[in-house]
């Protein structure tokens, strides 16, 4: 814990006196940065991300900015790796650091969805098959009720043809993905991965973990017979109830993931 | 071990002089509380529960009371988190603590089944598909012979319609589930999880672990061809034999789960 | 390592001056006992056994005796838990210790197979489905070539009817199983597990690990299409070559499994 | 890290003054040897190899030589285990050490493919079924785009009949495999495993890890429905983009695998 405190002090110092002379908007809440670091570790520990994938959070002092790590494996993220981006996904203070090619996923979703405070992009393994086989991902139990009645699939070929590198590497592709996501909580990306949104870091992490779990359990259930999914009303009510419980696994996951610190 | 002893002393002290002025019935056996804490950790370590799920034990001094942790991830449970409930699932000494929404599962089963001394509710992953695909869970080897010839499925829609949040959040739903369980050892809950009962903490933990294992192995076997399940007589005899061996894995699981202490 | 040395000294002392006054035949080679302890830990670490299952080795000083742990989870076995049995599976010096109900598996195989020096009985998970679905287990790659052209299945109903507890709990059942095993390296036991034999502890452990792996890979391959298995000649030649390599994984597994010591 | 430095000093000393009097060509770059050791550990840690499998790298000072460990489990490889081989796969300075029977896989590929700087041979589990069921392995997402449009299968029976031990135990078999590999990045070996090539150690490790992952995800996707694979153009472009990111997981994997040091 003392290491974390120390890291946060360094983080604030760097934020206010950048090498390039261009300071960021405002120092974000220290707890928010700590949670963002923890979330990176948790997502690795829970098998949602491997060396790839990223999570961002909307800036608590400025809704037109978001925070995300520099280009680094999520499991290795520290407070000093957190950077600020505007909604066009430009780094506010680049200082020569490498940044994620697909940061536009985040910026464009924040533009279209004012309710969204946190975004995860991952290649979580059980979800990939649903994107490429076009099997409809649906909630099979209360824990994944947030999936609602429909999880849309983003097919990059629809907007950019069949000759891309599949990456959401510019604002136009990010916007197209955000439009497919619409008002949903999760969108699959064919041949690539998925994107999950939420109104807080613990909520979006919860959703990413249970989207992966639902995909695994649904694939298994479909091999056993005809599956009874949640009705729209069950999904809506269960999502609301479970939403009140997201801090319970968050505390567990955080403790487990930060143990190595 | 000294930490555990210390925790138990604190636990007893708190039990006898509650903040609210209403003392619990009687101090339960220290070994029982220690086993309940260990069982919480074991269930997480063995993959039966994640951040959710709970285990209770009937009070050894009063059959009309049961013990269960406050609302917390099972892996984090300590002796001081153990609370006492009456069979209507009211906390005897709440002291403002959050409690599990689905505690009625436990209370109502204890009412209907005087032989039951311990209850587990979990979302153990291999079991979920059997609940939603309505595939019949059956014992495929001696270790899970306690499943007997029939594992009933509780469909909440049958008693409360298709618009619930799927949670067993009141006594009526708990009673309906207990009735579906009947004299069985395990009942599946469609779109939710399962419930397992036993005559001791080690036995119910054993059953929860091997229910999960049976589901995993049965799903695999069904993909290979027609499965030969245990006959009712094989199930009955094997269950009796294996019952004499439940302390063997218990010692192993306990040592493994408590190691981090 | 010093702990292991110390344990072996205690083991030899106990062996020579038993509480009951009846000394065992002869002190077995210390390396053999150390390997037997290590094998117990390895089998747990590699997922072949859980809280159940056992491994024995023929006594190096007397071919009519074998060594095996008392009734305890394999992961917890220490040198002082090793006991001596005659081929009728009587403990030579019981001293009130609980012993495995299914020790007859070992004794009866040693009687019928003078070439066998070590025996493992397990419920390794990927193998169970092959026993109950009667899918033929066959070698799909060189590593499991020792499976040869045929892995027989022991159906206890054939010799004792459909009302047993499935356990090989006496000499007659042990003999029937040994006869089904015949000259093979592995036999499946319907609704129960499997038995593996070898000419040394490292070899039998190797075989148990790769029988489990073959079952897992074969089940997966059968879902992809028609499988090309090894020809009898390929199996024979590959088994011979791979046999010269069993010490390579043994060293790795031993180091990994004994690390916690 | 100091242990690693020390190991490298010993390594260089041994390299220059061999017991047999025949010095190796030239001392390879210390970073290259360190990476080769790390790669051995990473491949084990990531589940690509178990007690078997090997990785080699072309000598940085002499393209007609390559470096590989002596016959030992990859997870146990240290700098002093690294040996030098000529392209006919003769050890330059044997000193009585046991060497891998299948080293010809490496030497013959280096002969035919001047662009290849590193080679991995493994039995990674999800890949085996594709070799024996002759299901075509194809890239299902950008991460495994390097698989391109075709992964050839080497059937040893085509060149040596159905009575081999399946091992690539001589130069003729190595050459036949290298020819089947052709200009591809991966070739499957029926009833055995696979071989992966790259232009650096981090790249070949990346490819081996994601070949395994692709096999696992593709098998799962094929069970859900008709799979949309990458088009040739998508594969080509994504492979190029992802190639610029291989150091990101490498740093993570290295840190994780070397932690036990």
Image (cartoon, coloured by chain):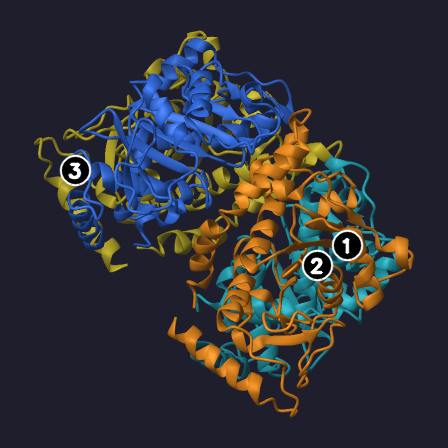
Chain colours: A blue, B yellow, C cyan, D orange
User: How many marks on residues?
Assistant: 3
Mark 2 or 1, nearer chain start: 2
**Compared with residue D22, is residue D181 higher up or lower down, i.e. above or below?**
above
D180 sits to left or right of C44 = right
Distance from disc 3 to disc 2, alpha carbons, whole Å, reads 70 Å
Report in which chain the residue with disc 1 lies: C
Which of the 4 quarters of the picture holds residue A54? top left
Quarter of the image containing the C terminus of chain A? bottom left
Distance from disc 2 to disc 1, alpha carbons, whole Å, reads 7 Å
- Tell me, yes or no, whether dots 3 and 1 are on the same chain: no
Along the line of sight, the residue nearer the viewer: D110 or A58: D110
Along the line of sight, the residue nearer the viewer: B184 or D156: D156
Counting from the top left corner in percent of width and height, residue B213 is at 56, 40
Q: Residue at x 56, y 63 (%)?
A: D40
Mark 3, Cα crowd under 10 Å, few <14 / some 14-19 / many 20+, is: some
Counting from the top left corner in percent of width and height, residue B109 is at 39, 25
**Compared with residue B44, is residue A211 higher up or lower down, i.e. above or below?**
above
Q: Residue at x 70, y 33 (%)?
A: B223
Distance from disc 3 to disc 1, alpha carbons, whole Å, reads 73 Å
In this orientation, does residue C98 appear? no
Q: Residue at x 41, y 55 (%)?
A: B256
Question: Which of the numbered marks, if any, corresponds to residue C105?
Answer: 2
* Element type at mark 2: helix
B121 sits to left or right of D197 = left
Mark 1, Cα crowd under 10 Å, few <14 / some 14-19 / many 20+, is: many
In this orientation, does residue B44 appear? yes
- Find out whether the residues at labels 2 and 1 contact each other: C-beta distance under 8 Å: yes
Identify the residue under disc 1: C177
- Tell me, yes or no, whether dots 3 and 2 are on the same chain: no
Identify the residue under disc 3: A27
Along the line of sight, the residue nearer the viewer: B199 or A251: A251
* Element type at mark 1: helix
């Amino acid at each position: 814990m003392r290491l974390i405190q120390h890291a946060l002090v360094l983080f604030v110092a760097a934020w206010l006196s950048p090498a390039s002379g261009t300071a960021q908007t405002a120092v974000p809440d220290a707890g928010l940065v700590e949670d963002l670091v923890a979330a990176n570790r948790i997502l690795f520990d829970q098998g949602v991300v491997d060396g790839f994938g990223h999570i961002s959070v909307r800036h608590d002092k400025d809704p037109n900015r978001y925070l995300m790590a520099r280009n680094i494996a999520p499991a290795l993220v520290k407070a000093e790796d957190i950077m600020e981006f505007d909604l066009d996904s430009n780094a506010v203070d680049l200082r020569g650091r490498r940044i994620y090619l697909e940061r536009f996923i985040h910026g464009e979703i924040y533009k279209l969805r004012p309710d969204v405070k946190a975004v995860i992009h991952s290649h979580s393994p059980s979800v990939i098959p649903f994107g490429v086989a076009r099997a409809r991902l649906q909630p099979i139990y209360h824990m994944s009720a947030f999936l609602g009645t429909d999880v849309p699939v983003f097919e990059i070929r629809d907007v950019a043809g069949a000759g891309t590198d599949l990456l959401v590497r510019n604002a136009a592709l990010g916007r197209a993905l955000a439009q497919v996501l619409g008002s949903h909580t999760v969108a699959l990306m064919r041949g690539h991965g998925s994107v999950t949104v939420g109104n807080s870091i613990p909520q979006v992490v919860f959703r990413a973990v249970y989207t992966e779990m639902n995909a695994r359990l649904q694939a298994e259930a479909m091999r056993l017979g005809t599956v009874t999914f949640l009705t729209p009303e069950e999904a809506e009510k269960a999502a609301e109830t479970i939403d009140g419980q997201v801090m319970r696994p968050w505390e567990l996951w955080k403790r487990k993931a930060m143990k190595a610190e």
